[in-house]
Image (tube, rainbow, N blue to C red):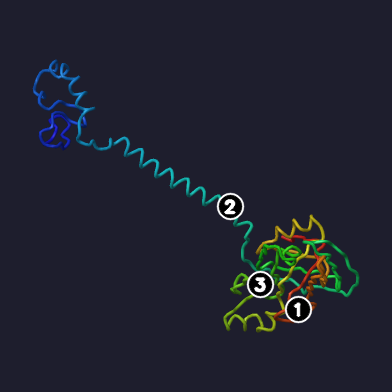
């Protein structure tokens, strides 16, 4: 049956309308009769056993809450992107970057790190202008992670120039840098030998707290000049356990030991 006043669908044999409150049996009586029965209608509303449907206002409120949740979630994603994308960096290419410069030197410095007495032997002064193509942070209690918690993959020459048009698929892990190219891309930049000799994976040891903060800021896409020394590490702890970590001194070597271990004295951003 339907309410004679608002025309909403009602269960059969209903005494009043759950939507507008009209008393069905007295619909055709005078208004005074309806008013006189108002108390009984109210009483029936609070004592009825038939479930009442949700009011339209509540449905609208639920829809509004859903929309608000979607908007807030979208804003949260945007905030995360704004926070983390600048730290991750972007892929790009830079032309005109020359070869790293190193000159033979001597000297050493000693520091205490993680229970080790660490001797840092300086082999070459080292200055490298390069494009940062990838970075990798290392966490843990190992001496290598305390000495150099961040590795930076650097490129120069045509590898840096074409980094935005050729996908080198850079990645880092286990203190190494990995890359791969399609065959036609290798021909484009002068072959695998040229590519392998114009990038390097670098373990960066900060010489002080200021340099440490600069190293932390390094990200993919940065055009930088890193200054310092190529060094070898010789360390020993109180129990007599020793640790040795040597640097590469050539850009042409590959495999284990081919990474540069740099005692960094300064980092400058060029653009």
Residue 148 x %, y %: 74, 65
| Mark toward the start of the polypeptide (1 vs 2) | 2
Q: Nearer the viewer, residue 70 or 116?
A: 116
Q: CA distance from mark 3 to mark 2?
A: 29 Å
Nearer the observer: mark 3 or 2; the answer is 3
**Is label 3 in contact with label 2 (beta carbons under 8 Å)?**
no
Instruction: State the residue position of label 2.
Output: 82
Q: Is residue 121 visible?
A: yes
Instruction: State the residue position of label 3.
Output: 174
Q: Residue at the spot x=66%, y=83% of the render?
A: 192
Count neighbours of disc 2 (C-alpha within 10 A) and say few if under 14, some if 14 to 19, many if 20 or more: few
Residue 145 x %, y %: 72, 65
Q: Quadrant of residue 45?
A: top left
Element class at badge 3? loop
Q: Quadrant of residue 108?
A: bottom right
Residue 64 x %, y %: 38, 40
| Mark toward the start of the polypeptide (3 vs 2) | 2
Task: Name the image quarter holding the N terminus.
Answer: top left
Q: Residue at the spot x=78%, y=73% of the render?
A: 245
Residue 154 x %, y %: 70, 70
Q: Quadrant of residue 225?
A: bottom right
Element class at badge 1? loop
Instruction: State the residue position of label 1.
Output: 251
């Amino acid at each position: 049956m339907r309410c004679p006043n608002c025309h909403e669908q009602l269960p059969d044999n209903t005494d009043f309308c759950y939507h507008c409150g009209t008393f069905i049996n007295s619909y055709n009586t005078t208004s005074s009769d309806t008013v006189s029965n108002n108390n009984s209608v109210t009483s029936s509303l609070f004592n009825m056993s038939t479930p009442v449907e949700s009011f339209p206002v509540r449905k609208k409120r639920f829809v509004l809450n859903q929309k608000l949740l979607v908007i807030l979630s979208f804003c949260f994603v945007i905030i995360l992107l704004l926070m983390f994308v600048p730290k991750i960096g972007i892929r790009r290419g830079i032309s005109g970057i020359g070869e790293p410069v190193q000159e033979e030197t001597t000297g050493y410095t000693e520091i205490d790190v993680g229970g080790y007495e660490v001797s840092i032997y300086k082999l070459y002064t080292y200055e490298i202008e390069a494009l940062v193509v990838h970075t990798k942070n290392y966490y843990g209690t190992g001496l290598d992670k305390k000495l150099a918690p961040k590795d930076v993959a650097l490129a120069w020459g045509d590898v840096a120039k074409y980094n935005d048009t050729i996908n080198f698929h850079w990645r880092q892990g286990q203190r190494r840098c990995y890359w791969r190219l399609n065959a036609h891309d290798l021909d484009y930049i002068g072959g695998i030998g040229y590519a392998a000799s114009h990038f390097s994976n670098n373990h960066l040891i900060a010489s002080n707290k200021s340099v440490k903060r600069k190293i932390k800021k390094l990200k993919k896409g940065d055009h930088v000049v890193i200054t310092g020394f190529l060094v070898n590490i010789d360390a020993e702890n109180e129990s007599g356990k020793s640790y040795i970590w040597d640097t590469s001194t050539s850009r042409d070597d590959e495999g284990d030991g081919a990474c540069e271990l740099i005692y960094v004295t300064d980092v400058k951003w060029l653009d």
